Amino acid sequence: MTSASKMFNEAKGLLRQLRDNHRWLTEQHRLWIADDPQGANDSTFAHRMGLFSLIEQALRCAGLTGCIWAPGGRCPQDAPVICDGCTESDRPEQAVQLGMNDATSNTVARPLQPQSGEWSRPATTESSGLYVAPRPEPFPNFELTPDMAGVLDRLGHTNALVTGAGGTGKTILLNQYHATTDHQVAVVAPTGVAALNSGGVTIHSYFGFHKDIRPEEAATKSPRNPDLYRNLGSLIIDEASMLRADLLDCVEVSLRKNGPKPGHPFGGVAVGLFGDPYQLPPVVTNEEAAFMARYPSPHFFSSEAYRTGGFTTTSLVKPFRQSNDGFLQVLGAVRDGSATAADLELFNERVQPKVSAAQVRESDSTMLTTHNAQANTMNRTILDSLPGTPSVFRATISGDFPPNRYPTDTNLALKPRAKVMLITNNMPHWVNGTTAVVAEIEPEVGVWVTLPDGRNAFVSHYTWDQVDYQVLNGRIVPVPVGEFQQLPLRLAWAVTIHKAQGLTLDRGIVNLERRVFAPGQLYVALSRFRTLDGLTITPRAISKADIRVDEVVRRFMEALHEPAI
């Protein structure tokens, strides 16, 4: 493997030099090819297209997304089309087939100037060759339940709340809709981390709201780009459990003024809320408490917008993460706060008073902690205990990418035998949350990891886009305004419960050394595990005091006749 990997990585290094910071040029070349109607059917064009496809596939496998024809930013003479003076595409359907999701008859390829380490935001006029962030890939071979299929039929046509316990497919369903819908759709979330995970932007960013926006101000605020709201057909809000009532009211009054149907609820935009109110709640600071007293609770369902919005509700009930009925029943009781002492005994039989760093390392477990400091200390302790000097991979950050949204460490220290979590989807090889062990490190290039099924896989740099929705030829599209490039890994001997939301674990330890401090926090931790056999609790038993459920949420969910499991 060593000699093959050396050759592979030397080739990757050469390709990385050739691309010379031009991450946009692959999309530009696709347009240039489509702009050559005369050569579309001749053998030379067909031959070059075949070579392009093979090279592009190799680049994708290598984890690169840059230009393959333009070292130093200049097209070679044998490129299918030279960028200088290129004309408007009169074959937009080919451009779409070649990967430009939103190419139209007004989309042209413009030459790009070389950059010297600085990331340049592309032009945003309708005549620009604008790079558009791709939509998420639908999960392959995933069979939708009848409830899921019904939701897909309604999204984009009516306001809908999609809820359900952890592991019932809410994220899969959101991605499926986003990947396949023909509606003009924007995906937003209450927090930056949630927005990055769902491939969208924060609510504040999309609507141009400042931090302390109030509905009265949002109702009169002039939009920065009226077409961004006038053309909107469907708005998806992920992680709705963290969505505050006043923020949803701000969204409603803003769209009522600026949406496609002014004066109508949400301006005629169909809103889809995804989330489990029993999980992590919205945050209200002491300074905001007086204002929020106008609402029965801070949750989205206490807003005027939700109360009058005519939302249909679908509770997803089929569990995809767990299969044991007894485990599911007790998880449901922890979720809604009805767990008895007998229920908790199912978990407390698995208490281990002391768990050392060495035990975590040797048991192939992931520890879930309530606080960041605990997770960081455990990861650093175990990494230091491994032999050798760590290799440090440094992130490349460009454009507008706030530090609180970094998906992993900017300086990622790794050693052979380090336990890591893959934090992207690369199906069918791995999904977000798959744990692996570092087998071999290629400094500055990537790492070989051993996956749970014993297969080896090479992990190279991945680019996360920080996007901003813009209007291109009448369509709302996500356009990158910043990027974070790093290995899609984080150390996985320990992670916080907050960062574990959405993950699935086969084996792990819930650390209750420090008390849970938020409603739903314990449920999120326990519901990450596929089976009871993979769960250990330390250093003490779970008590009823650890099960924190907001009574307002319980009444709301009971009114929906939503089962606990």
Image (cartoon, rainbow, N blue to C red):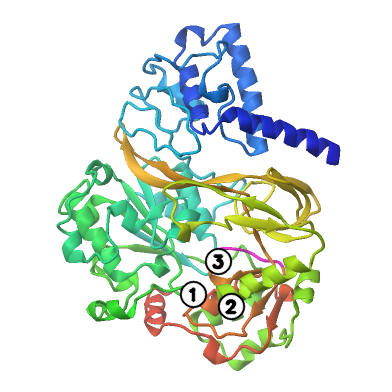
Q: Earlier in the sequence, mark 2 or mark 3?
A: 2
Q: Earlier in the sequence, mark 3 or mark 1?
A: 3
- Frontmost of labels 2 and 3 is 3
| Gap in angstroms between the C-alphas marked 2 and 3 | 20 Å
| Gap in angstroms between the C-alphas marked 1 and 2 | 12 Å
| Gap in angstroms between the C-alphas marked 3 and 1 | 26 Å
Magenta-highlighted residues: 502-506
**What's under tag 2, amino acid-wise?**
Leu
Q: Nearer the viewer, residue 518 or 379?
A: 379
- The residue carrying pointer 3 sits among few (fewer than 14), some (14 to 19) or many (20 or more) residues within 10 Å by Cα, namely some
Tell me what residue is drawn at x 31 percent, y 29 percent.
126
Tell me what residue is drawn at x 52 percent, y 77 percent.
521
Query: Hey, which quadrant is residue 246 in on the image?
Result: bottom left
Tell me what residue is drawn at x 67 percent, y 37 percent.
62
Task: Write down the residue under mark 2.
Answer: 331
Q: Nearer the viewer, residue 285 or 96?
A: 285
User: Which structural element holds mark 3?
Assistant: helix
In the figure, is residue 212 to the left or right of 101? left
Q: Nearer the viewer, residue 239 or 436?
A: 436
Task: Write down the residue under mark 1.
Answer: 563
Q: Label the magenta part by its dominant secondary structure.
A: loop
Residue 267 tag number: none
User: Which structural element holds mark 2?
Assistant: helix
Quadrant into which the C terminus falls: bottom right
Residue 499 tag number: 3
Q: Is residue 1 visible?
A: no
Quadrant into which the N terminus falls: top right
Tell me what residue is drawn at x 42 percent, y 51 percent.
200
Disc 1 and disc 2 in contact, CB within 8 angstroms: no
Q: Is residue 504 magenta?
A: yes
Query: Hey, which quadrant is residue 323 in on the image?
Result: bottom right
